[in-house]
Amino acid sequence: MRICKFLMVLMALALPWNAIAAIVIVTSPHSALSQVKQSQLRQLYLRGSQHLGEQKVLALDLPDNSALRDRFYQQAVGKSASQVKTFWARMIFTGRGVPPRQVGGVSDMINTLRHQPDTLGYLPEGKVPSDLKVLMRLK
Amino acid sequence: MTTTRKVVMAAAVLLLAPLGRAEQTSATSLQSLEHRLDDLQQQLEQRHDWSDRISVNGFITYGMTRHNVHQNDVNGNPVTYLDRTTDQVSHNELSRAGLQFNATINDRTKAVVQLLARGRDDYSVKAQWAYLDYALTPSLHVRGGRMVLPFFMHSQYDNVGYAYHWAALPDQTYDVVPFDTMDGMDLTWNFSTGPIAQRLNVYGAAMNVPSYSLPVPVTYKVSQMGGINLTSTWQDLSTWLSYSQADVSLDLDAIDPSVTLDKAGTSISSVGVQYDNGSLVMMAERTQLDMDGWFPTKWGGYVSVGYRFGKWMPHVTWGEANSRGVNEAAQGGPYAQSFAAANMVRSKSWTFGVRHELAPGVDVKAEVQRYYDFNGDGIRTNGLFSNVLRLPGGINRDDPMVYRLTVDAAF
């Protein structure tokens, strides 16, 4: 019985960690992209690039106050939300680029990805609809 | 036909059918409904296009500043820091607001206009940036129009307080050159060498620069200006190299023809490094301004270290500015010597500050900067306080300080 309780406590402790879903990079089902590299994510999300090679790609972002966004930037490009905000302040006001388009939230991200073939975004792994194309799973 | 459209048409049919008019209207009404839907869809697309093609960004800073030198100059006016700030709190010296409009004209062309209103200019609006950008290739852009000069590492976002951790950029470097915009063109090439992202920029420009450092207001005519700069970024580390040169003319024939500057060769250079791993922030830069004639050679630099503890970031900066050329100027006669003296800079300083992130895009910053070492090597200055022509006896306290408090936002 005591072992049982101990295991239950352990599981309860482990739960919040399990609850944090992995982040996946997704694109429209009609996109010509079949994979994406971490260096390309840096290109799209930190340099404001709208192309990967010859392919036009419009990166989508979640709102500033999203916890998923904070985790995405940390995992995808190794920057904190505050670093990213400062970085874009420098880029925008010197005309070096514009940040990825921000959508209203996860469901808005899914809708935009569905209807605009050039777009690319990120979602929690558990919330990816079957009709979207997963390009990469962040570690 | 989109799903929305199908649903709207189905709903229209359902609404019309119970009225018993389905048969007579199905052909004509559906056709007119379709036309209306076409119009609405077109309008929606146009609106969508418009918001996709034009974006507006802005920044604002509200700041307070004063110094602690409670003295008057030879004219009985309070001693100033950077010719403006006194020992009374100023609410407009650091305060400013900017609005930027970005318009995408087509896939390759965009127009950017950034309007700036500074408290110290009584909020009169001027175009800080106004240029057309044409992408020759996705990584090679040419721009023409009004732009901010890329002399130093942080020059081009000097007015965007949110873009750096200080309440004001290090003055011994960033307040030595009294002008910031150019009218001309530049070419920027983004490329990679292995894991290093590079941005190479070359520019050409001309401008007139008013100056108030001499006893009478004068205008420096800057021609044949050109420069090159390279930003290299590898992970959390970024380096900056820049070199610019120009011919500078200043007509002082009415005073003494020997002090007139006629296309005096001038160069401005800078080398800098930045590191930011999310917690530790380090920056260092060394800059130099060389001009032929009586104008002194000035150089400046700083080293800054900060550390983020959550939303708080305390930081410390050591800065220095110095001049050379006092002996050469003395050979040019009394006017040359006097003008050179008015343009000399020499000081060292420690700046202690803290930045607090109030919300994404909003911060509050407080800092105090203490100056020392104004004289030496044959140079006598009052640092960046009222110059020796205005305050010949020097500053009568050994701990002159400038205090700053700002709130910045970028949106």
Image (cartoon, coloured by chain):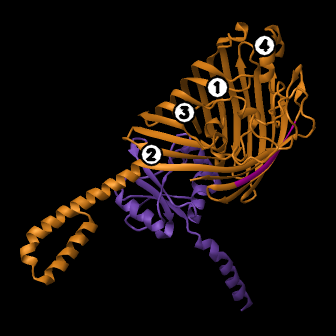
Chain colours: A purple, B orange
In the image, is residue B33 above or below residue A75?
A: below
What residue does disc 4 label? B335
User: Which mark, by number, is residue B147?
Assistant: 3
Indicate the secondary structure of the residue bearing disc 1. strand
What residue is at 70 percent from the left and 27 percent from the top?
A: B212
**Chain label for disc 1:** B
Q: Position of residue A113 (x, y in %)?
A: 40, 60
User: Which mark, by number, is residue A50?
Assistant: 2
Q: Quadrant of residue A66?
A: bottom right
Q: From the image, state whether disc 2 or disc 4 is nearer to you.
A: 4
What residue is at 42 percent from the left and 34 percent from the top?
A: B134
Give the CA distance from mark 4 to mark 1: 19 Å
Q: From the image, state whether disc 3 or disc 4 is nearer to you.
A: 4
Q: Residue furthest bottom?
A: A1
Q: From the image, state whether disc 1 or disc 3 is nearer to you.
A: 1
Query: How many labels, in total?
Result: 4
Give the CA distance from mark 3 to mark 2: 24 Å
Q: Which residues are magenta?
A: B364-371
Relative to B20, A29 lies left or right: right
Q: Position of residue B357 (x, y in %)?
A: 69, 57
In the image, is residue B8 above or below residue B311?
A: below
Indicate the secondary structure of the residue bearing disc 2. loop
